[in-house]
Image (spheres, rainbow, N blue to C red):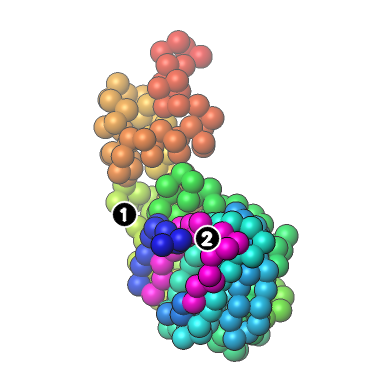
Amino acid sequence: MTTAQKTLASGHGWSVSDVVCTAAAGDKPFEEEHRGFCIAAVTRGTFRYRTRQGTAMLAPGAILLGNPGACYECGHEHGAGDRCLSFHFSPAYLERVLADLPGVKRLGFADPRLPPLPALAPLLAEAEAARETGDGDAFEELGLRMAGAVVAAATGSSRPARTPSRRDQKRVAETVRLIELNAERPLSLTALADGTATSPYHFLRIFRQVAGMTPYQFLLRTRLHRAAVRLRSSDAAISTIAFDAGFNDLSTFNRRFRREMGEAPGAYRIRRTEGR
């Protein structure tokens, strides 16, 4: 077996996997079939990808595109191994994304890949960072953003999104208050969108436009802010503060706190005791 696949996160109609292939130039190309829509970001190595849409060489930064039921073949004539972040979507899931993309009507990819595009680079970096840090909670939003961005790029849709309406702004404000009241609890993007009676993709888009960040980013920053306040104002154990804030394990809290605040929770608390 030359391919190892690890599921990083999944939900209704979507999943994301870390796929590592160790095939070499002398190995026989393997054939498989896409069970749903596939959007796979190449993060390491090169390989040849052949499907009914055509044949393409994929390198880091490129996006493999696959349609449901399409057979495909991957080969490594020019070098050994590759690694991809592979997002999979059901047709129903992608149809909901297309419904919120202006000017996009066709469900399905006409080309086998997207070349490395500057517009996608920041999103790919976020996704790869989430894989490396084990931030599985981030992939619900990342998968939805990836689907929308890739479909728009693949279809040439460049029409700007409409300005959020007052109703949209009201929905976002209500969601912000909901997150503030329940920040310590698990809050999925789908559940938040259902509360506003909008599709997850539309909800994510208007939330980013109105609030300047995604719902998950706002939730994470709310949790970290509350933890920082408690670190300065109480003597509770760091683990207690982390769990009370909504983090499932201490290592995840320490890593995210350091990234957001610039230092570890313990060092942040010590500065309070030193009177700085």
Q: Is residue 207 visible?
A: no
What amino acid is at disc 2?
Ala
Q: Residues within 10 Å of mark 2 (few under 14, many from 20)?
A: many
Instruction: Identify the residue at horizontal 36%, vertical 35% (top origin).
Output: 251
Which element is circle 2 on? loop
In this view, 266 is above or below 142 = above
Of residue 214 and residue 94, the one placed in the foreground of this image is 94
Which residue: 58% across, 69% down? 75
Is residue 250 visible to us here? yes
Report the magenta residues as a range.
13-31
Q: Is residue 188 left or right of residue 77?
A: left
Secondary structure of the residue carrying tag 1 is loop
Where in the figure is residue 198, as x and y percent of width and height? 44, 75
- Looking at the rendered structure, the number of numbered marks drawn on it comes to 2
Percent coordinates x, y for residue 25 in the rendering: 60, 62
Outermost residue to the front: 26
Q: How many residues crowd around disc 1 within 10 Å: few (fewer than 14), some, or many (20 or more)?
A: few
Q: Residue at x 32, y 24 (%)?
A: 234
First in residue order: circle 2 vs circle 1: 2
Question: Magenta stretch: residue 85 in it?
Answer: no
Q: Is residue 164 above or below residue 270?
A: below
Nearer the observer, 22 or 213: 22
Left or right placement of residue 240 versus residue 231 in this view: left
Query: Which residue bears the numbered disc 2?
Result: 23
Q: Position of residue 63 (x, y in %)?
A: 62, 67
Which residue lies under the disc numbered 1? 186
Where residue 274 sits, quadrant-wise, is: top left
Task: Decide: is 3 above or below 92.
Answer: above
In screen coordinates, is 13 left or right of 78?
left
Quarter in which the N terminus is drawn:
bottom left
**Looking at the picture, which amino acid does disc 1 mark?**
Pro
